[in-house]
Image (cartoon, grey):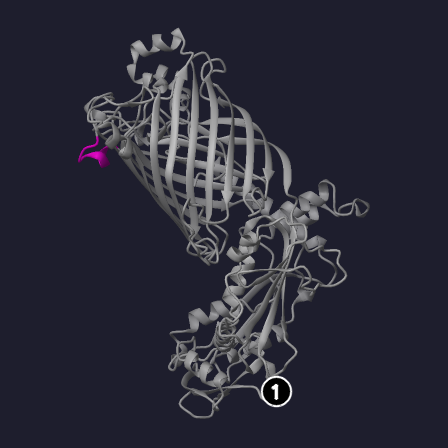
Amino acid sequence: MKGLNVIGFILLMTASSCSVSRFLPPGEKLYKGATIIIEKNVAVKNTSKQLKKQLKLAVTPRRNKFLLGQPYKVWWWYTIGEPDPKKNGKGLRAFLRKKLAEPPVLSSRLNTTVTAENMQAFMENTGYFHSTVQGDTVNSGYYTKAIYKAQVQPQYHIKSITWISDSSALLKLLEQRQKRGILKTGQPYRLSDISAERDQLDIFLKTKGYYYFNPDYLMAYADTTIGNREVALYLNVKKTTPEKAKYSYKINKIIVFANYSLVAAQLDTSMQGAVAYQGLLITDTTKKFNPRLFAQTITYRPGTTYNSRSQNSTLNRFISLGTFKFVKNRFEAIKDSNDHRLNVYYYLTPAKKKSFQGEIDGFSKDNNSLGTQLSVNWKNRNLFKGAELLTVKAYTGVEISFADSLRNNNSFRIGGEVSIKFPRYAIPFFNIKENNFYPPNTNLLIGYELFRKQLFYTKNLFRLQYDFTWKKNIQNEFTLAPIALSYLNASNVTDSFYKQALINPAILLNVYSEAILGSYFSYTYNSAQRSRKNKWYFNASIDLSGNIAGLVTGAKNFREKTIFNTPFAQYVKTDVDLHYTRAFANKWNWANRIQIGIGIPYNNSSLLPFSKQYIIGGSSSVRGFRVRSLGPGTHQPTAEDQRFFQIIGGDYKFLANSEIRIPITPIISGAVFFDVGNIWTKDTLLFGPGAKLSNNWYKELAVASGIGLRFDATVLVIRADLGIPLRKPFLPSTDRWVLNQIDFGSSDWRKQNLVLNIALGMPF
């Protein structure tokens, strides 16, 4: 039977091959790519492999995609047929061609002479002087293939770097800076390095006041005749460089137009009505803004040397405020040619001050539930005339669990919050000055939420948070919340809930009223903006609660002290989250994550607050186990517990995930994943000795694997992951690996072990 399938597949591919050939225009062949041959030369043996990869980048055109030697996308192109021209690129055929097919790359597009010249030029520019490339074609059936033979000479290296200098300040500055630059003696000659050096020197000069300088004013001359395959580099400023580019400029005046209209015929330079404030001239005829806003945002003052970094920082800070729809600036040299100073003009177009917005959101949670939320937001982008953002939000939503029946485990919520974001450090009695590229933010939030678990209980949650967020650069972000308060009060607890609590008292923690008087600090590193191939994400945080309250009340024992008749939590909680993603040339991605969490309750608390506990399993965790069906340790929650309630979690957590993400179409990708993890408690209070963290924790790890599909709908990613358990820590120690029990043909096995996770967004 398998043999027949293979034969059928071969016949299908042969048929598709023939059908492609009959569609080709007369005299045309299908281009099948190029082969590059580097003739043997002992002197270039060590670099030939890398050179061949680089020469492939110069090959044009790019061939069609092939599967098992067949141009399957070209076959789709002809099979789907031409779309109706009257539909202007719309319709089913146009859609299918765009998603499944690609036009044929024909032999008439091939020009081996031009490609060979491009390869030869590339080698000249990378120091392989006097190398040659010859191109030819080979026909086979209805295919054409290009053959390029390269005779490569040894690469030249830089022997010396010399500035043709004079006594000018500009040349002295360039010569001093270049010694710390990209070009170094002994390295291979590369034109790209010379170009990069020019750009770096230009950036450097822009920080030293040379506003009018341009990298094209720098000249490099390479002498390749000195022998021994070495190059002598000579650098200089061109004689045709304009005079104004040779001088460093200082800032004369800084003028801000706070209400600039885009319909203005020309940029205004009038300073009529301008108000002087901390070295700035501010024109704000409508009095919309406090002058302090501009003094805080602009990072330099008159009399300072022009610096492109300060200029870019100021523009970014204006844009980050969110108060201005458009921001532009202009530099203008004063008319006296002997006075090297600049006037700076900022033209700011305010955004609409107030706005109202409604949203319908979909979300998924780790507990394998999906939900929808309706929210309305009212915003004021300039509350106190200092670009403060006031947001008033009201929302309501429903959350549905696929694993539970509609009447038992669904929940409803309604709430609201008021927040103010200050584009600065807003600390009473303190005025902190800073001029970072990314301005800091201070956030103040007050919120309330009513949460109803259908048929069981109601929770009232009050929140107050005061935090600061700042960035050192685009990769490093810090958050400090000196005040993070929450108060949880449960009410309307039903008899059904208490009956279940007689069986499992642990669920009473779901309705325990508690106050969290805390603070936290977090640090985030994200390299995604800097690297496309290797992406690192790291987050570390520490969360503290009850320290000051404990000192005030003298709390010593479990639940001994209260604030406003409510016990307050005391704990220390720290989390580490590390991600690494490797991108491959075929657009495959290998994504990995490690999470470690440690929570230590003390004095007034013997357990972490319910909202701070760790859970395991579900759509973004160990995906072969449903949420709440795993842990702590070797404990296994009962079926009733899993069905009705959120069971207590753990004080410690370890989680590791690895998955290969494979593109299938532009909007659909697949994944193969492998997950490991579990949670533990610090004592045996609720779940016995099996739940407590011990030296044998690694023997209690759950292991799961599976496959998934991801649909990228542009605005959101819909994800379906099908996981199976490979190791069950709640089984006896000798029976935990269950690989030998896998039986996809058994309906009972599938019912007990196949876990379908439906979620929105990527798992990590």
Of residues 706 and 359, the one nearer the viewer is: 359
The answer to whether any part of residue 421 appears in the image is yes
Question: Residue under circle 1?
Answer: 240
- Amino acid marked by disc 1: Thr
Side (left or right) of 75 relative to 503: right
Q: Position of residue 605 (x, y in %)?
A: 25, 26
Residue 699, magenta (yes or no): yes
- Which quarter shows the C terminus? top left
How many labels sit on residues?
1
Q: Position of residue 27 (x, y in %)?
A: 73, 63
Of residues 206 and 657, the one nearer the viewer is: 206
Residue 383, magenta (yes or no): no
Of residues 17 and 67, the one nearer the viewer is: 67
Give the farthest residue toward the left: 695
Find residue 230 and report its image quarter. bottom left
Q: Is residue 441 above or below residue 450?
A: below
Q: Residue at x 17, y 36 (%)?
A: 695
Q: Is residue 183 above or below residue 621?
A: below
Q: Residue at x 43, y 51 (%)?
A: 431
Disc 1 is placed on an element classified as loop
Side (left or right) of 640 relative to 173: left
Q: Residue at x 31, y 20 (%)?
A: 637
The answer to whether any part of residue 17 appears in the image is no
Q: Position of residue 609 (x, y in %)?
A: 32, 27
Find residue 134 and report its image quarter. bottom right
Q: Is residue 574 above or below residue 85?
A: above
Give the farthest residue toward the right: 86
Binning the other alpha carbons within 10 Å of mark 1 as few (below 14), some (14 to 19) or many (20 upward) gives few
Of residues 45 and 519, the one nearer the viewer is: 519
Q: Position of residue 658 (x, y in %)?
A: 38, 43
**Residues drawn in magenta:** 693-700
